[in-house]
Amino acid sequence: ADPVPSKLSNVAAPMYAWFGEALTRCLLSQDWNLRNTGIIVLRTRMLQACGMVPQEQITDKDSIPAHSLDIVEFTIGVVARACDDRIAKVYESALDLLHVLATNYVAQLLKAPKAQVDEE
């Protein structure tokens, strides 16, 4: 993916730590296909964090933590940006990501013992 545009550097900076540079660049790309792919990858990583992807099917070596309020915050930001996208496919993928976030990731986060929840 292309470098993140300078006008989005403030948005990208904290995302690098949680999503990695490649995924962040995709999510903030000017190319709609890369934005859509980034959303799909984030959705898959979220399902992996919830234990909903069989171990033998995991091909992405990068992961996200299973119990992080920061992941919730940044994912909501990704969805909010995608809701303003002119490309319907990006919008649809973002709604699917929001569904996974709400029904799987947040549900698991709420069930986790407080000591396991990352509140940074």
Image (cartoon, helix red, strand yellow):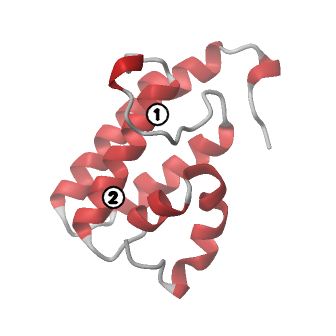
- Tell me where residue 96 appears, x and y as whole percent: 29, 38
User: Badge 2 local density, few (<14 within 10 Å), some, or many (20+)?
Assistant: some
Q: Which mark is residue 88?
A: none
User: Badge 1 local density, few (<14 within 10 Å), some, or many (20+)?
Assistant: many
Q: Is residue 97 left or right of residue 89?
A: right
Q: Is residue 3 left or right of residue 117?
A: left
Q: Is residue 27 above or below residue 70?
A: below
Residue at 19% in and 65% down: 87
Q: Is residue 17 above or below residue 71?
A: below
Q: Is residue 23 above or below residue 71?
A: below
Residue at 17% in and 59% down: 88
Q: Name the secondary structure under disc 2.
A: helix
- In this view of the protein, which residue sits in the foreground, 18 or 94? 18
Q: Which mark is residue 83?
A: 2
Q: Is residue 79 left or right of residue 108?
A: left
- In this view of the protein, which residue sits in the foreground, 62 or 37? 62
- Tell me where residue 106 appears, x and y as whole percent: 54, 27
Q: Say which residue label 1 marks.
A: 46
Residue at 22% in and 48% down: 92
Q: Is residue 29 left or right of residue 104?
A: left
Point out the image quarter for the C terminus. top right
Q: Is residue 34 above or below residue 31?
A: above
Residue at 33% in and 58% down: 83
- Tell me where residue 23 appears, x and y as whole percent: 45, 57
Q: Name the secondary structure under disc 1.
A: helix
- Tell me where residue 59 appears, x and y as whole percent: 37, 35
Q: Earlier in the sequence, mark 1 or mark 2?
A: 1
Name which quarter of the figure residue 34 lies in. bottom left
The amino acid beneath tag 1 is Met
- In this view of the protein, which residue sits in the foreground, 112 or 63? 63
Point out the image quarter for the N terminus. bottom left
The amino acid beneath tag 2 is Cys
